[in-house]
Image (spheres, rainbow, N blue to C red):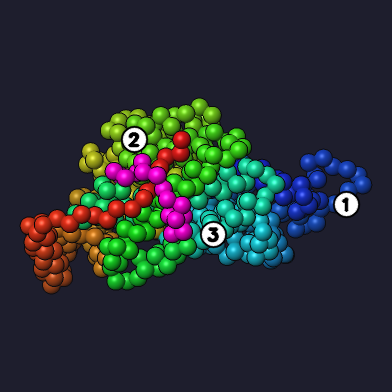
Amino acid sequence: MRFSPASTTRSLLAACLLGIAAAACAQANPDPTTPAATPFEQLVHDGFALHQQARFTESIPLFQRALRQQPTDYFANLLLGIDLLRVSRPQQALPHLEAAARQRPSELIPQQYLGETQASLAHYGPAALAYQHAVQLSRNSSDPSDQEAALLSWASFAIERFRQIESTLRATTQGEAVARAIQQSAGQPLPPSARQCAAQLPSLERQLALPTPPLPATTTQLALCYAAQAGFAAADLATSSQNHDQAAIHRLRGDVLLRIKEDPQAAIAEFQQSLTQRPGDPAILERLAEAQWTAGDADSARASAQSALLADPHRQAAIRTLAAIAVSTRDYPTAIPLLRQLAAEAPGDRLAPVELGRALAQTGQEAEASALLAPALAAGYPDEKGALHALLARCLRRTGRPQEAEAAESEARRLSDDFQRRSAAPATAPPASPVAEAPK
């Protein structure tokens, strides 16, 4: 999912007016006494014009040419990083955004886009640090909307990261119990001490990224901490004395209601309120689609997701919703291209390649399915009951790999037997912890 900061064009224009590429910007109102733009300034000016029109594939070469002339220029690095990110090339965007952040360490925008880029690369610890740094910087800004934008980006990231971790939790019986406990306690007040867990996020993310499966307590603590941080950011945003971006407030309320409190109908109402103030916004439309699908309204969800993708073909939540709708009706010819796009553009989404592997297996493409399922399972993707290992075994056997198939079948039987034994044992209560509360 994309976590782009609000008011980007406004901020970039402000930077331009403050003197970055000033000669090129002045061409909008030519003055005989104004010196002609240098080749570098002309490239930045032309690239920025294309950037404003969302013509990113055309703007990128211009910024690259500009940087060959002035490699450390803040504005060119920033815009090139943003535009590379917008065409799903986060690995290439990262060094340019890092360069912009080094050039202007007190600037808010590079940190927000660094957070989005690191999240796209599944570098969640650095992403959390960048978003938190942006919130700190925003407190020193003379523009009140900067703090709102930083809080919204941080809260949106935390909620989306919570969703990703929760989807992993729900793949096991114990995790499902924890997820239910989180939902049941979502309305409880948050103690002030819960804010301090933000400092632990990078360490917890490193533990989660280790090759060995993380301890259940680590995954649980990480999910609950993100939920708590989303709640605090939402509360800070809602109680802000400015509150002039009501569309953002409604959108964030909807996010908390949908992904943490699991109340899709209430979330739909919030997203619809947000759309009345920001019609056609793809970020809101994709959230509305997810809420409608969760509430069981597939037709409305499909329409909302398609509208979001018409405005921005890289909206990952919209792609995910359309893929889920297609899989639910066994429309694999529609689902597979969507899942391929999601797996390519969201490397941090562990579910996408697994769902793609399942869909490919259902359509007789066992070789590609096994190439996706085997590494996912080897990396620790949850398979509590052994069903995925059994599917992998079937794919391997059908592609003439009997020895590997036998090993997968053996692991499937072991996992199934372990699950049966655990199911017969007395249940233990999941840990309780404060979680986010929807902003009032």
Q: Is residue 273 above or below residue 221?
A: above
Please report whichever mark, 1 or 2, sits nearer to the chain's N-terminal start. 1
Kindly state the secondary structure of the residue where label 1 is placed: loop
- Viewer-nearest of discs 3 and 1: 3
For the residue carrying disc 3, how many other residues have a C-alpha within 10 Å: few (<14), some (14-19), or many (20+)? many
Q: Residues within 10 Å of mark 1 (few under 14, many from 20)?
A: few
Front-lying residue, 372 or 170:
170
Report the residue that reaches farthest toward the right.
Answer: 33
| Residue for point 60% across, 34% down | 244
| Percent of width and height locating residue 254 | 42, 37
Q: Report if residue 287 is visible in the image.
A: no
Q: Residue under circle 2?
A: 264
Which of the pair 307/244 is nearer the observer? 244
- Identity of the amino acid at label 1? Pro
The residue under the point 30% across, 37% down is: 294
Amino acid found under the numbered disc labelled 3:
Ala
Label 1, label 2: how far apart the Cα atoms are: 58 Å
Residue 253 versus residue 94 in the image, above or below: above
Determine the residue positioned at 43% across, 62% down: 201
Q: Amino acid at mark 2?
A: Pro
**Label 2, residues with CA under 10 Å away: few <14, some 14-19, many ≥20:** many
Name the foreground residue: 136 vs 83. 136
User: Mark 1 — residue?
Assistant: 35
Q: Which residue position is annotated with label 3?
A: 130
Secondary structure of the residue carrying numbered label 2: helix
Query: Residue at 11% across / 57% down in the picture?
Result: 426
Q: What range is drawn magenta here? A: 183-198
Q: Is residue 48 above or below residue 428?
A: above
Q: CA distance from mark 2 to mark 3?
A: 30 Å
Query: In the drawing, does residue 96 fall left or right of residue 21?
Result: left
Look at the image and say whether residue 294 sits in the magenta stretch. Answer: no
